[in-house]
Amino acid sequence: MTTNHTLSLCVDPKYVFQSFDNLGNCYNAVGDTSGSNFTDVVETCLNDYCENPYPDLGGCGNWNGTASLPFIVSTTKGAQYFWNNATCTGVSDGVNTDIGGPGVFVSYLMQLGIIFYLWALLRSFRLCQLLISFCARRKQRREINPPTNQTKGKLIPKIRHFFNQHDRITKVILVEFQEAQCFFMIASQAAILLAKKSTTIFESNTMPSLWANNGIAGVVSSAGVLPTVMGMWSLQKMHLTEPWIFLLSVTTIIVSEFALYWTHETPSVGQLSPFNYNGWPDSCGGYAPPLIYCTDPNVESNLRLPLLFFWQVLNPYCLIVFGLDVILWFWLYVARMVDIDAVCERTCTRLGLHNLPSKVRQLLSSTWGEWFKRLPSLFTFCVESLFLAAVFLELVCFAEFGHLQVIDFSGWGFGQIVALTIWFPVASKYAYLILFGTESYSQARMPESDDTDKDKDITSKDTGDVELAGLQSSDVIKHKAQHGQEADQ
């Protein structure tokens, strides 16, 4: 209820502009009725400021000598803002370069691009290996009439050696890249969590800047989740899930989810950082004009749109794949340490189901069983097909933030260059191994193994992979025999 005491305070600039709560209380008590004393106080403050705007605050983009009324002060929780079309236009909305500079923005794009390249390359190598095996079997059937061109007979082993060498290099780089991106993500999320814990977020002086910083922080929290999950999934499919990389990946996802949760909250005016400036007009009571609270609801809704894609579409998908990674990783180690068939037989015996294991084997050997064996491969195909959609959607979100022009791409600095070049060690090592081969690399960092151990390793890994379940040990034996015959020729 409006009181005379409240009305008397609302004509004092030192009270009105001291805080957003005071400004909102006066607006709710008096309104923006033209000719009221409160309206005159606000209008005088705006006009005096616009005669000599402070560069770091900006504003007054549509000001023509007088502030055109009305103005709006919204005190609704989650939608606190001040808006006047004449003076709010042009208010500073810059993003803190430490969290959303051009180098950081491009660095996340590079992270997504590198993991997509490695994932696509490893997938193509699997297809090429199957194609080469198919060609080798056809050649073996034709060996009754040996070819007259010996060079043609040596072509398949050379191609196989090239793909095996490149596949091995790519797997090594994938492990190192997964470790690098996990540390990069953990460092970024730790900085966001510490910033959110502070009373002011990213040193935002205006509401547009606060919204932009919070939005970019949400992108930083979620944009790296998809590359990390893709790397974790690829490592699991290649059976390269050592405990260190697994625990590092799990920690990265957990920390990122915490940071994403905090950035999902709507920012409030209490999180603004005050300007270090004492030259505000006396008509504003020596405080900053209400332009620091300027917020265009239409613009802020556009800023939240990419975040909604991350929060409601990409993040649930990444969490599902992450859960599958964890289950498959534990299952792989359980299968190595425990004889699953023996445990199942003992369990069925205790339950009185003596014939169940034999019936299951009969079912698996039937036509329906063959189709059932293909379900893991089909499931993997569906998950990785959605990788393509997820990568495309994340690129669309990045493009939307670029279209909103909340990032100053001319603001390159020391930190931006560091953020951009963090991926160069992995990329340069990959290029070096491709050009000069693994033989030229340090034996202490990547020791070479002989062909026998390499074949055993490939056999043990491929037969345990759900995607290459059809590539049995007999195929490897045939390939060894074929390789020996070719060597004798």
Image (cartoon, rainbow, N blue to C red):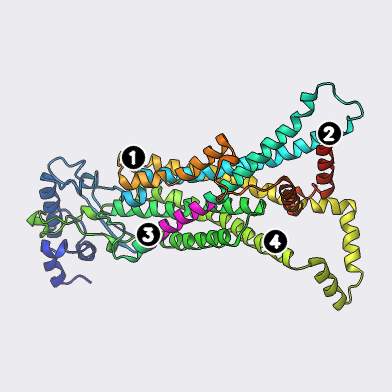
**Who is closer to the viewer here, 59 or 451?**
451
Secondary structure beneath label 4: helix
Position of 445 with respect to 262 (left or right) is right
Residues at circles 1 and 2 in contact by the CB criterion of under 8 Å: no
**Which residue is under mark 4?**
332
**Which of the two marks, 1 or 2, is nearer to us in this view?**
2
**Which residue is under mark 2?**
488
The crowding category of the residue bearing disc 2, from other C-alpha atoms within 10 Å (few below 14, some 14 to 19, many at least 20), is: few
Q: Earlier in the sequence, mark 1 or mark 2?
A: 1
**Who is closer to the viewer here, 134 or 72?**
134
Q: Position of residue 188 (x, y in %)?
A: 41, 56
Task: Using the rendered view, name the quadrant where residue 170 is placed.
Answer: top right
Secondary structure beneath label 2: helix
Secondary structure beneath label 3: helix
Q: Position of residue 284 (x, y in %)?
A: 12, 57
Q: Which residues are magenta?
A: 178-193
Amino acid on which disc 1 is placed: Phe
User: Going by the picture, which residue comes out furthest to the left?
Assistant: 282
Q: Which label sits on residue 50?
A: none
Residues at circles 4 and 3 in contact by the CB criterion of under 8 Å: no
Q: Position of residue 381 (x, y in %)?
A: 69, 47
**Which residue is under mark 3?**
191
Query: What separation in Å lies between label 1 and label 3 (alpha carbons)?
Result: 22 Å
Q: Earlier in the sequence, mark 1 or mark 4?
A: 4
Task: Using the rendered view, name the quadrant where residue 32 is placed.
Answer: bottom left
Query: What separation in Å lies between label 4 and label 3 (alpha carbons)?
Result: 35 Å
Q: Is residue 200 above or below residue 470?
A: below
Amino acid on which disc 2 is placed: Asp
